[in-house]
Image (cartoon, coloured by chain):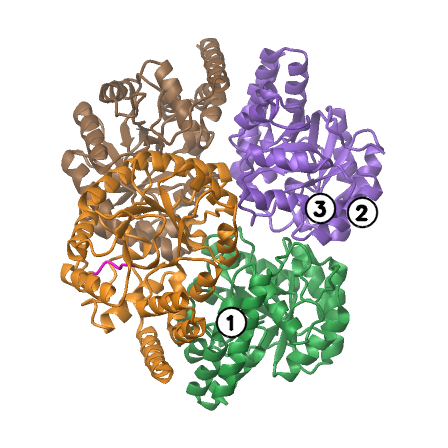
Chain colours: A purple, B green, C brown, D orange
Amino acid sequence: MTRLTAEAKGVYVIAVTPFHADGRIDYDSTDRMVDFYLEVGATGLTVLGMMGEAPKLTIEESQAVVQRILARVQGRVPVVVGVSAPGFAQMQTLTRMVMDDGAAGVMIAPPGSLRTDDQIVGYYAQAADFIGDVPWVLQDFPLVTGVQMSVPVIARIIAANPTCVCLKHEDWPGLEKIGALRKAGTLDRRISILCGNGGVFLPEEMARGADGAMTGFAYPEMMVGVVENHAKGDMDRARDLFDAYLPLARFEQQPGLGLAVRKYALARRGVIADPALRRPGAALSAASRAEVDLLIARQERRLKELG
Amino acid sequence: MTRLTAEAKGVYVIAVTPFHADGRIDYDSTDRMVDFYLEVGATGLTVLGMMGEAPKLTIEESQAVVQRILARVQGRVPVVVGVSAPGFAQMQTLTRMVMDDGAAGVMIAPPGSLRTDDQIVGYYAQAADFIGDVPWVLQDFPLVTGVQMSVPVIARIIAANPTCVCLKHEDWPGLEKIGALRKAGTLDRRISILCGNGGVFLPEEMARGADGAMTGFAYPEMMVGVVENHAKGDMDRARDLFDAYLPLARFEQQPGLGLAVRKYALARRGVIADPALRRPGAALSAASRAEVDLLIARQERRLKELG
Amino acid sequence: MTRLTAEAKGVYVIAVTPFHADGRIDYDSTDRMVDFYLEVGATGLTVLGMMGEAPKLTIEESQAVVQRILARVQGRVPVVVGVSAPGFAQMQTLTRMVMDDGAAGVMIAPPGSLRTDDQIVGYYAQAADFIGDVPWVLQDFPLVTGVQMSVPVIARIIAANPTCVCLKHEDWPGLEKIGALRKAGTLDRRISILCGNGGVFLPEEMARGADGAMTGFAYPEMMVGVVENHAKGDMDRARDLFDAYLPLARFEQQPGLGLAVRKYALARRGVIADPALRRPGAALSAASRAEVDLLIARQERRLKELG
Amino acid sequence: MTRLTAEAKGVYVIAVTPFHADGRIDYDSTDRMVDFYLEVGATGLTVLGMMGEAPKLTIEESQAVVQRILARVQGRVPVVVGVSAPGFAQMQTLTRMVMDDGAAGVMIAPPGSLRTDDQIVGYYAQAADFIGDVPWVLQDFPLVTGVQMSVPVIARIIAANPTCVCLKHEDWPGLEKIGALRKAGTLDRRISILCGNGGVFLPEEMARGADGAMTGFAYPEMMVGVVENHAKGDMDRARDLFDAYLPLARFEQQPGLGLAVRKYALARRGVIADPALRRPGAALSAASRAEVDLLIARQERRLKELG
């Protein structure tokens, strides 16, 4: 069984959870989605993240979704599972389940009540203790969690917890943070840095030292293209691609609404059968759908120009 | 099976969840605690509330604790169960479980992300829809949830949801709110108002029109005494009792620390075997324990003076 | 003297406050900046906004900056002044000063302590009462203020306060809000809607019914181009321009850092002498400056392609 | 001119700002208030604090109030002035004014935007730099400011800023914090710790090592009595006094409403002519006034019993 390591790189797509219009989980679409993500070049998957509507699932559903995805992936790429929970008992239970099922690691976001540096460091020490010998991703997403992790705090967490192998970098602004983390001497060991925020800063993030993306933009081709062209040293091509997708990526990055945009685009592409979010979840208005259609049309035109 | 109604009154004690020092649930103490609460005059119990360390339990543990308590209560008083959850699917699952087991109703706190009046009203409409024909308590606790519910919002929630039968009033300050809710014409029907905040405003709350307390101060005798003397019209005696307990009640009301104080006092009284909180949870320092000891000694002296 | 009305449209540029490197106000650059904004097509100016470093100025400095700008504008376009303050006394004092000096109106953001609908409506009733017969702009910027104003709340504010003539729309996401406000029957009269957020949603905002922009992107040409082409009905051209500027606009939209990016770009364009922010204020790192340089180079190339 | 030092102790009363019913400052009441505070045993005064309605004053009014109070005090006790402001320029201006007028030092609360340890430490380094050689009080009041300062952060601030001589301790819960700050080795020098929170934890705070109170309960006799009896070693008497005042002190401690309670009690005592708060400010309902009347009557009865 593959385990997540500090060498993780490329594009870990944050998977959506497909639902039928009536709110039931759509497992056929889940299979198709896995195939799609791997075909476009995903080097990993992350499931039950915030954009996977994880809090809307019961524990049984969460496990069922993870098992279905793992069965379809068949070990071809590592699968990371979000296990953030209000208490450590639930986090521990879910972690054991998904690791037994074959997950490569877990991801943990901080609870919104944490404020001081010591509180944050203390929380992760306890979490790591509870989940035991399981590699995990530190999720740094202040816009949503309300928790600000400074560079020294991240350094303390990494120094104290050998099982922490990756940072899901989603601070905004966050470019200087990547720079600081990559500076010699900041961390006591190199970890993987994969970036979120729908990919809307990916070219700059790669240039600052990120290892790739962990986010779920409906056109993962953009992230794959940026990462691959960066690896080849062709940043101009990377930026051309990025710019072509940016108008839609920006539109998908709207808080609250973003997931509905993403699912609409995935349904439009035939990846999932229905764009439905489970309740409570914003439905996309006709005006928004028309805007997405227009943005996709312009995006295709621009990609054609670029060749 | 008793169901919670809008006529609920008296003292619904918020039960703690007793743990062994190693973090396992202490079921023997749970039994003893139920006996104790009923002996001192509780007219109801509320379990899995915020002060019941609910988020630290797995779903299986939550159900086991509720079942144990219901088995011990044997229908003598109604038992309300906190079912607040990040998603409606979990809320629904837990509600069905505990109602099948014999609970009298459930309690729902709002998620911290709600801001506008419409968002709050909309959330409760969805929650009520998910839990179906189950009586529920609206928990109004802005200090902890961050959600401010105005009087018009509470009126809209009550008008829209016939299954909402009780308000757990824990706004601070909140006396004017009780007054406004009890004013003719504010609500379209009378509901029960039971007050929290460790009971530190109980005399004034009763005078403003509350029906009792729903809180967990380690000396429920205080709440019982205030409510009973209020019913008899002897507010001077009610206040004398209240004042005697206030120095300790104030001490127990410290956020974060309060539950450790409460459990220490309950263990000292022989109600639970161990004052332990499950991790993560504040331990009481030697200095704090000495302060509680002193406050209890002074409290006993003062109660003796009062006769 | 021109007064702001509900017919305001076009591009109201949010002016920066130019400083010397040592923190003194740079009045020569202020003059040059006014000339620049008017040359590129601004139909109004907004000064002492959040991006104008208003809280870092003393009351004397605030007045001096406004007077200098008004003297340079010489009535050619209306000038709106941000007067948000912790108390109404200060708000009133500043409003009187700047209106006496020739401002066209003021802008008021809500204090972060407001939560319920009634609190927000009540706050603006008091503010409007204090400033008297002065036209004002309602600033709706939840990402920074933490205050969520629903459509019904905005409708109540507009109904209650005839002096409120314009909404500075900066909710995110906010497109549906514009749609709802423009729907017949939502408001009891039409007011101007000018959009913020650095212009990164301007094409969609115009399509939804906005009257223009009130924001400070370092290339106001973008906003002017989008608004003018929208007016001509050439949305394809508007979007081509928008897309060309979007990579930089996105970069400038980083919270906290954005103003430093904006001032760096304005200094690079020769508009202001020094990119310095008054303390406390983020300085732009060498890496960030290089990124801006690259984005501007690519932007110019793309604009040339577009012709 | 007396300057505040790290030896400050006793009771620094947080002064209210008396207003006439129409909102004008009531200077005669200000004089009477100063006399009253000194007569009941205040060892210092703090003006323009949060409970002094400072943000509702214009800069001119702020200076006038401080000058009036300083003129009446005539150097008999040190006067500390709150100078918290959105920007350093305003803070610097107000500090210079009041120090020139004869204040003993200033008090600075953190802006609510600060989150990480480094942000807090950095903010105070800048503030101290701006105000220059002026002794200052570090205000730690997370319930209102939203800023959590850990013990290591306070230690860093004190180590870095020799002009920081006093901590206004108003964390809640905060007893362990006092203990930690007083432990040998935590701070590199001893500073004064004066406690807030309306005095409702004063006996425990003194026992943990505080030097006194800096708060504004309408019966400063309570704080004076607790501090003096603690100094004499008679904590039982200190606690008897405390318990007698606690029901009212608790009532005055209600957020938002507390200042109206305080002013009502001060007006009832004849200290100030009118209980009015300047707008925006909560008025006390008839029900609340009756509750305060009752609490005062019971308080007087209990004090008589105690002798």
Front tag of 1 and 3? 1
Q: Alpha-carbon distance for marks 2 and 3? A: 25 Å
Nearer to the camera, B70 or A269: B70
Q: Which residue is mark 2?
A: A97
The x and y percentages for residue C295 are: 48, 16
Direction from residue B74 to residue C111 in the image, left or right: left
Which quarter of the rendering shows the C terminus of chain C?
top left
- The residue beneath circle 1 is B249
Residue B158, compared with residue D64, is above or below; it is below
* Residue range corresponding to the magenta coloring: D14-18
Label 1 resides on the chain identified as B
**Mark 1 and mark 2: span between their CA atoms?**
42 Å
The local crowd at label 1, few if under 14, some if 14 to 19, many if 20 or more residues have their Cα within 10 Å, is: many
Amino acid at circle 1: Ala
Distance between mark 1 and mark 3 Cα atoms: 51 Å
Judged by depth in the image, the label closer to the viewer, 1 or 2, is 1
Q: Is residue D15 magenta?
A: yes
The residue that label 3 is drawn on is A20
Tell me which residue sits at (61%, 71%) in the image: B265
Q: Quadrant of the N terminus of chain C?
A: top left
Give the mark, 2 or 3, whose residue is nearer the N terminus: 3
